Structure formats: C-alpha cells, structure tokens
C-alpha cells in the first residue's frame, strides 16, 4: 500500500508550531479548557491544516460529504440477522429514494449523500441503478466461515476503488468526510476482524447486530469463531490486507481506502459506528498516521467497538445508544467539527478585550 504515505501532523510540526496552536486556543476570551473537547478538536484541526497548508490562521473545515458503501456478506446466509440479504438492496433503493435515517440527517445539515454499491448480492431495480455509484467487487463476499471472503487482489482493488471515489469528492472541495455502510451480516465480519487485529476474544466482541435472538447469537458466535480459526491457518503474518481478504467485506475495504485517501489529502475523517471503526482500524494498521485525521463520533451499542477504541487509544465524542449504521452517528458529529473551527476562527482574544 505504498500509495498511501501519510505524514502525521504531530510528526510534521515542530514543537514551536504546536505550542503556537495551543497558545491561540488558550488565548481566547474564556477560562482555560472551558470549551472542553471542542478545544482538543480545534487543536487537531489546526495541526492537520498546518501540516498540509503551513498555516492555521483560519481553519477551513466547512464542506462535508457523506459516502455510504453497501455490500453483502456470504456468512449472512446462515440466518444470523433478523432480515435476509435482500434487505441490503432494498435499503440502497431506500437511500436513493430519500427514505432512510441518513437521508433525513443529511437534509437537516444540507450535506450531499453519495451511495456506492461496493458489492451487493441482489440486483437493484432499473430505476435506481443510475443513481448509485457502481464499484461492485462481486455479488457479496464468500462465506468466511468456510472460505476466504475475497481474494487478496480483490481486497487491494476494493481499497483503491474507495480511495478513488473519495478523491473525486476532495477535488470538488470537500474537507470533512463521513463514511457510512449498509450490509446484512457485516457485524460478523467486523467482529472477526476486530478479534485478529486487536487480539481480543470473540466472546467479548460478537454482538446482536440487528437485534437477533439468543439462539441466533450462539450460531453467529460459532460461525465467526470457525472463520477466524480457518483464517489463522491462512495468514502467516500481521498483514492487515491479508486479514481483510480472509474475513472482511467489500464495503469495509472501500471505506478503508476512502479514509486513507481523505487522510492523505489532509481532510477530516469522521468515523461512525462499529463497522466504520473496523475500516478505520484497518486504515491505521496499513498506515498508522491515518489516526491523526480521524474523529470517532460515537460509542455504538455493538460491544466490539470498545476493543477498537482501546487498541487505538481514542475516545468517541458522544454516546446516544446508536446502532443503525449508515453513517448516522458521524453526520451528527459534523457540527462539532464546524463549531470547533468556528470558535478558533471567530472568538476574540482575551488580551484584546
């Protein structure tokens, strides 16, 4: 993945530059630290912008884009969700029609929404096809409890596809990137990847996803364990892309590539729930400097996300008991980014009062 050589802002900036950014924040007309985590966000934004534009006189993080990647998972055919794989295609059509939660939240903030077919199993109705970006890597992944989810070549291709569509949005002037997903069975894939990348026991990671019963949860856990044990016999190193190929989803791979492309360009990456956090974890394992560009929006109800937070040593902005996906939690965090930039740009300095 040599296409993603990212210089971390923290490493790129001199100590004097970092002290100057902190002094700017501390010098605003307020008690020290009284804006809490907004101050840490402003510092992160200023570091990002200084590293890429050599100035942080005025922070420019205003124009958001939402990219929702949809893909199906072969493991879902075991009935580990309350709904079948057909729902992925139906939800994609609902996104296009404007009837999903992500549509409503994007409309409130007037944020454009792009829907990507990363590899759904069932065909879309003809009237919807031209309104969805087609980056399909196939009709869903293979059942990772029995086979590799995808080939290594397909994993690399999917990462690059996610990067390319993100770069198109960057060229259109977007500077805040929200990544969302849709895919029946993707919490199984996310749990498996979290287990191997964070060296964490699956019993603490596999959750109820769409709200499955105890019996379905037991089946899901057994299948994910089987898949992880199978994959461990195939992957002989710590290569994150090899793990992705064995256990991942097309939508996870494309989000990973999109996050790396946004970070490479010095843009903010807003991370949604558990599935998106796994994509972020993969991006950071491929290129650790990606982490400096990421803001983790919320604590999902899925238990596996906590292991990712611990591994990356990050803390989400809020906890609203969300577990929908689609990028909904990350969209709610866009005003946090904009507000952090606004106080940095517009608050008077205490010495000027």
Image (cartoon, rainbow, N blue to C red):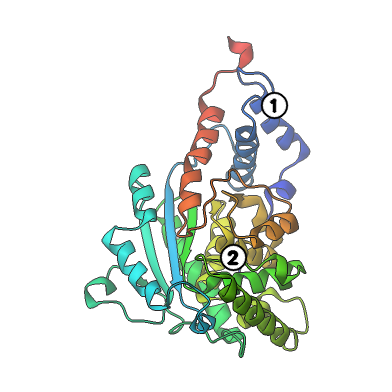
Q: Secondary structure at mark 1?
A: helix
Q: Which mark is residue 35?
A: none
- Residue 67 sits in quarter: bottom left
Q: Nearer the viewer, residue 209 or 264?
A: 209
Q: Is residue 21 left or right of residue 123?
A: right
Residue 156, relative to residue 276: is it above or below?
Answer: below
Q: Earlier in the sequence, mark 1 or mark 2?
A: 1
Q: Nearer the viewer, residue 288 or 124?
A: 124
Q: Which residue is mark 1?
A: 23
- Residue 62 sits in quarter: top left
| Residue at x-position 75% and y-position 88% | 233
| Residue at x-position 58% and y-position 61% | 274
Spatial CA span between label 1 and label 2:
34 Å
Number of numbered discs visible in the structure rendering: 2
Q: Is residue 3 left or right of residue 196?
A: left
Say whether residue 132 is visible.
Answer: no
Q: Which mark is residue 279?
A: 2
Position of the N terminus by quadrant? bottom right
């Amino acid at each position: 993945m040599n296409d993603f050589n990212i210089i971390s802002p923290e490493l790129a900036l001199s100590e004097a530059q970092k002290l100057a950014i902190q002094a700017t924040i501390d010098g605003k007309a307020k008690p020290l630290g009284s804006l809490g985590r907004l101050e840490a966000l402003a510092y992160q934004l200023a570091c990002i912008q200084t590293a890429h534009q050599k100035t942080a006189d005025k922070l420019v993080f205003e124009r958001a884009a939402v990219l929702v990647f949809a893909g199906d998972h072969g493991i879902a055919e075991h009935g580990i969700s309350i709904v079948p794989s057909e729902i992925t295609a139906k939800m994609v059509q609902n996104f296009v029609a404007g009837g999903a939660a992500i549509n409503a939240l994007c409309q409130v903030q007037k944020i454009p929404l792009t829907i990507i077919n990363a590899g759904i199993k069932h065909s879309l109705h003809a009237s919807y096809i031209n309104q969805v970006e087609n980056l399909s890597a196939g009709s869903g992944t293979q059942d990772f409890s029995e086979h590799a989810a995808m080939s290594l070549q397909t994993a690399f291709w999917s990462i690059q596809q996610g990067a390319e569509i993100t770069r198109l949005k960057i060229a259109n002037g977007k500077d805040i990137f929200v990544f969302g997903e849709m895919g029946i069975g993707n919490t199984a894939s996310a749990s498996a990847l979290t287990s191997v990348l964070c060296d964490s026991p699956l019993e603490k990671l596999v959750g109820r996803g769409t709200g499955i019963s105890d019996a379905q949860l037991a089946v899901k856990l057994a299948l994910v364990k089987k898949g992880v044990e199978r994959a461990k016999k195939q992957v002989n190193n710590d290569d994150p892309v090899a793990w992705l190929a064995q256990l991942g989803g097309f939508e996870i791979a494309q989000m990973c590539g999109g996050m790396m492309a946004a970070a490479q360009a010095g843009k903010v990456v807003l991370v949604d729930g558990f599935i998106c956090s796994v994509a972020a974890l993969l991006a950071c394992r491929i290129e650790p400097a990606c982490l400096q560009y990421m803001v983790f929006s919320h604590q999902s109800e899925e238990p596996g996300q906590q292991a990712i937070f611990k591994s990356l040593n990050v803390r989400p902005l809020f906890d609203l008991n969300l577990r929908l996906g689609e990028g909904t939690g990350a969209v709610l965090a866009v005003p946090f980014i904009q507000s952090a930039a606004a106080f940095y740009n517009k608050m008077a300095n205490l010495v000027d009062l």
